[in-house]
C-alpha cells in the first residue's frame, strides 16, 4: 500500500449536544481509516477548528445556538465535504442545494451512517469543490436572510440585516457597513443582493447596495447622477437605473 | 331568495302550484252558501281571483321578514299585519270587482255585477284570512330556520373547540422531541446502559400520561406539573448542564383544574426556542399561584434576543390561546413578554377546583 492510502481521513464532529456527538464518534471509531481530530459544541468553535485542523470531513448539526450548520458552511467555504446530522427532515432540500455529501436523521443508524461515509469517501477522492455562490444562494424562494455571517480570520461576526447600512462591491469581496464598522466578505454584490429582502435593500449603483431605511435624502450630483446621503452621513453614488429602482420601491411603499 | 319550506322540496313545488284550488274552493263555498248567486257565478269569481290573488300573498313573506316575531314589540307587530291584511283585503276585492266588470257581459253571466254587489265583503274577508294564514306559515318557517341556524352555530363552536383540542394533542407529540430523545438513548446504551433504561422509562411514562390525560376535559394542575417535570427531565438528559430548572408552586395552585397539556407548548418553546439557542444554556422557571379566584401560571426562560426567529414560531402560543378561548372565553388569557434575555409566558384563568370526571 502506498503512503497516501494509509493516511487517515480527518473528521470533525459539530453538535451542541454531548450525547449526539458521542453517537457519531462511536460510529466513526469503528473505522480505522478515520480519526476524529476535534469535537465542537457550537458553530464558532467549528469555524475555528476547520481553519486549524483542515479536516477532510465534517459531521454537522443544523440547529445550534448562534450559528446554524448552514451558517458554518457559508463561512468555512466549500472545500470540506459535509454530512449533516439532524433530527429535522425539513432542511434536507437545502442541504442538497449546498451540495452536502449526505443528510443523516437522528437517531442515526449504523447502515445509513456507513452509506454516508462511502459517499463522503467518493467525494473526497473525486475532489469536486462547490462554488461559494451556490451556498450563499441556497435559500428557499420568498425567504430572505435575517443576518449575514462574516469571518475575519477565525473571528466570526453576525450582522443582523436591519443593522446593515450598505454594501460596497470590491472585486471579489463586498464591504459591509454596519454600526460604524466595515466588514469584508468574500461574496459578489449580486449574490448578496439576491439573498436580501428586495423590499429593504436596493441596488442604487453597480457597486452599491443600500438599506432603504438608512437613506436620509437624495441630492443631485453633476449631470444625470445623484448622491444618496445616509443617516450615518455616508455619501453613496446613485446611477440612473439605480435611481429608477429606488423611486419604484419608494412609490410601491407609498 | 332561498327559503326553507316546511315540506320536502319536490312536494312543496306541487303544493304551491295547486294551492289556489283549495283557496278557490273555500271562496266558492263562501259565495255560494250565502245565497243570491248561481254556482257558476261563484265559480267564475272564486277560482280566478284565487289564481291571481295567491301571488299577492308573497307580500306576507316580506312583512314577516321585516318584523321578526322575536325582535318586534307586540303592538308594532299587530299594527303591521293588521294594516297589511286590510290592504290585502282591498286588493282582493278590487281584483274581484275588476273581474266581474270584465266578464259580466258573457252569455251565461248577464247581470253578474248586480248579483256580486253586497258579496264584495266576502272576497275582502277571504283576502284578509289568506293573508293571516300566510303570515302564520312564514313565521313557522322562519322559526324553524332560526332553530336550524342556532343548531349549526352550536355545532360549529363545539367543532372548533374539538379541533383546538386535537391540535393541542398533535402539537404535544412533537416528533423532534422524540427523535432527539431516541438519539440520546442510543448514545446512552453504550456509555451508561442504566441511564439509557431510566430514560426509556421516563419517555414511556411521559408518552403514556400524555395520551391518558388527553381524554379528560380538565385535570388538576399537580398532574400537569408532573408532565412538565417529566418533560424537563428528559430534555435535561439531552442538554446536560445547559438546562437548569426552578419551581415556585403554591400549595393551593396544585388543586386547581385546567385543560390537560395546556402548558406543554409553552414548556416546549421555553426549551427549543430558549435554552437550545444558548451556548451556555439557561434556566426554565415554573411559577403557579391562586389569588381571588384566579389562577396564574408563569413559565419563564432565558433566551437569546439576537437569535433569528425560527419557522413555526407562534404556532404553540396560538394553540394555547385557542384552547383557553374555547373553554373560558374572555375569562382567560395568555400574555407573553420579553425583557432583555428573559422570556415570560403567563396564563391566567378562573381557579376551578373539584373532582375530575
Image (cartoon, helix red, strand yellow):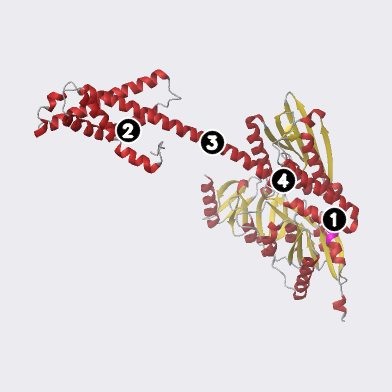
**Secondary structure that dominates the magenta span:** helix
Residue B165: image location, x then y, percent: 66, 41
| Residue B153, disc | 3
Say which residue label 4 marks: B172
Say which residue label 1 marks: A19
Within 10 Å of disc 2 (Cα), the crowding (few <14, some 14-19, many 20+) is some
Q: Which-is-in-front pick, marks 2 and 1?
A: 2
Q: Mark 3 and mark 4, same subunit? A: yes
Image: magenta residue range = A19-23
Residue A45: image location, x then y, percent: 82, 57
Q: Secondary structure at mark 1?
A: helix
Chain of residue at mark 4: B
Chain of residue at mark 1: A
Which residue extends farthest bottom? A1
Q: Are marks 2 and 1 in contact (CB under 8 Å)?
A: no
Chain of residue at mark 3: B
| Image-quadrant location for residue B319 | top right
| Image-quadrant location for residue B346 | top right
Separation (CA) of disc 3 from disc 1: 52 Å
Say which residue label 2 marks: B58
Separation (CA) of disc 1 from disc 4: 24 Å
- Which residue is more in the foreground, A88 or B53? B53
Amino acid at each position: 500500500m502506498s503512503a497516501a492510502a494509509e493516511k487517515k481521513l480527518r473528521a470533525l464532529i459539530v453538535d451542541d449536544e454531548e450525547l449526539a456527538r458521542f453517537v457519531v464518534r462511536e460510529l466513526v471509531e469503528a473505522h480505522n481509516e478515520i480519526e476524529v481530530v476535534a469535537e465542537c459544541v457550537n458553530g464558532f468553535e467549528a469555524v475555528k477548528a476547520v481553519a486549524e485542523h483542515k479536516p477532510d470531513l465534517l459531521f454537522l448539526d443544523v440547529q445550534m445556538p448562534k450559528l446554524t450548520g448552514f451558517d458554518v458552511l457559508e463561512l468555512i467555504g466549500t472545500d470540506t465535504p459535509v454530512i449533516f446530522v439532524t433530527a429535522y427532515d425539513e432542511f434536507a432540500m437545502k442541504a442538497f442545494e449546498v451540495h452536502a455529501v449526505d443528510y443523516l436523521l437522528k437517531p442515526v443508524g449504523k447502515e445509513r451512517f456507513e452509506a454516508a461515509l462511502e459517499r463522503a469517501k467518493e467525494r473526497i477522492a473525486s475532489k469536486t469543490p462547490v462554488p461559494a455562490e451556490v451556498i450563499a444562494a441556497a435559500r428557499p424562494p420568498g425567504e430572505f436572510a435575517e443576518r449575514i455571517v462574516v469571518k475575519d480570520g477565525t473571528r466570526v461576526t453576525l450582522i443582523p440585516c436591519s443593522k446593515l447600512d450598505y454594501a460596497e462591491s470590491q472585486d471579489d469581496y463586498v464591504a459591509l457597513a454596519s454600526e460604524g464598522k466595515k466588514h469584508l466578505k468574500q461574496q459578489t454584490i449580486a449574490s448578496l443582493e439576491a439573498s436580501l429582502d428586495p423590499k429593504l435593500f436596493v441596488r442604487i449603483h453597480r457597486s452599491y447596495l443600500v438599506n432603504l431605511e438608512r437613506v436620509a435624502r437624495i441630492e443631485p450630483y453633476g449631470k444625470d447622477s445623484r448622491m444618496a446621503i445616509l443617516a450615518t452621513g455616508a455619501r453613496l453614488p446613485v446611477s440612473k437605473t439605480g435611481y429608477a429602482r429606488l423611486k419604484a420601491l419608494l412609490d410601491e411603499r407609498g | 331568495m332561498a327559503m326553507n319550506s316546511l315540506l320536502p322540496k319536490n312536494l312543496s313545488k306541487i303544493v304551491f302550484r295547486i294551492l289556489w284550488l283549495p283557496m278557490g274552493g273555500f271562496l266558492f263555498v263562501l259565495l255560494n252558501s250565502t245565497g243570491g248567486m248561481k254556482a257558476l257565478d261563484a265559480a267564475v269569481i272564486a277560482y280566478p281571483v284565487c289564481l291571481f290573488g295567491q301571488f299577492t300573498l308573497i307580500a306576507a313573506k316580506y312583512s314577516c321578514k321585516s318584523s321578526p316575531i322575536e325582535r318586534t314589540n307586540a303592538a308594532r307587530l299587530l299594527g303591521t299585519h293588521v294594516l297589511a291584511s286590510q290592504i290585502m283585503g282591498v286588493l282582493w276585492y278590487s281584483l274581484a270587482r275588476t273581474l266581474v266588470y270584465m266578464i259580466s257581459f258573457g252569455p251565461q253571466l248577464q247581470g253578474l255585477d248586480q248579483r256580486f254587489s253586497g258579496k264584495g265583503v266576502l272576497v275582502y274577508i277571504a283576502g284578509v284570512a289568506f293573508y293571516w294564514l300566510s303570515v302564520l306559515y312564514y313565521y313557522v318557517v322562519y322559526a324553524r330556520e332560526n332553530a336550524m341556524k342556532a343548531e349549526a352555530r352550536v355545532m360549529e363552536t363545539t367543532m372548533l373547540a374539538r379541533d383546538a383540542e386535537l391540535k393541542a394533542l398533535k402539537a404535544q407529540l412533537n416528533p423532534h422531541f422524540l427523535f432527539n430523545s431516541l438519539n440520546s438513548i442510543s448514545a446512552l446504551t453504550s456509555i451508561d446502559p442504566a441511564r439509557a433504561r431510566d430514560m426509556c422509562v421516563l419517555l414511556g411514562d411521559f408518552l403514556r400520561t400524555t395520551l391518558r390525560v388527553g381524554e379528560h376535559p380538565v385535570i388538576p394542575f399537580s398532574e400537569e406539573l408532573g408532565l412538565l417535570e417529566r418533560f424537563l427531565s428528559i430534555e435535561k438528559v439531552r442538554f446536560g448542564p445547559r438546562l437548569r430548572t426552578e419551581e415556585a408552586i403554591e400549595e393551593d395552585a396544585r388543586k386547581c383544574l385546567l385543560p390537560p397539556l395546556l402548558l406543554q407548548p409553552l414548556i416546549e418553546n421555553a426549551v427549543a426556542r430558549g435554552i437550545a439557542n444558548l451556548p451556555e444554556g439557561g434556566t426554565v422557571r415554573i411559577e403557579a399561584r391562586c389569588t381571588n379566584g384566579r389562577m396564574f401560571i408563569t413559565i419563564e426562560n432565558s433566551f437569546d434576543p439576537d437569535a433569528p426567529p425560527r419557522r413555526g414560531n407562534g404556532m404553540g402560543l396560538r394553540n394555547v390561546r385557542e384552547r383557553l378561548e374555547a373553554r373560558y372565553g374572555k375569562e382567560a388569557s395568555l400574555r407573553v413578554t420579553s425583557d432583555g434575555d428573559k422570556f415570560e409566558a403567563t396564563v391566567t384563568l378562573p381557579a376551578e377546583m373539584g373532582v375530575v370526571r
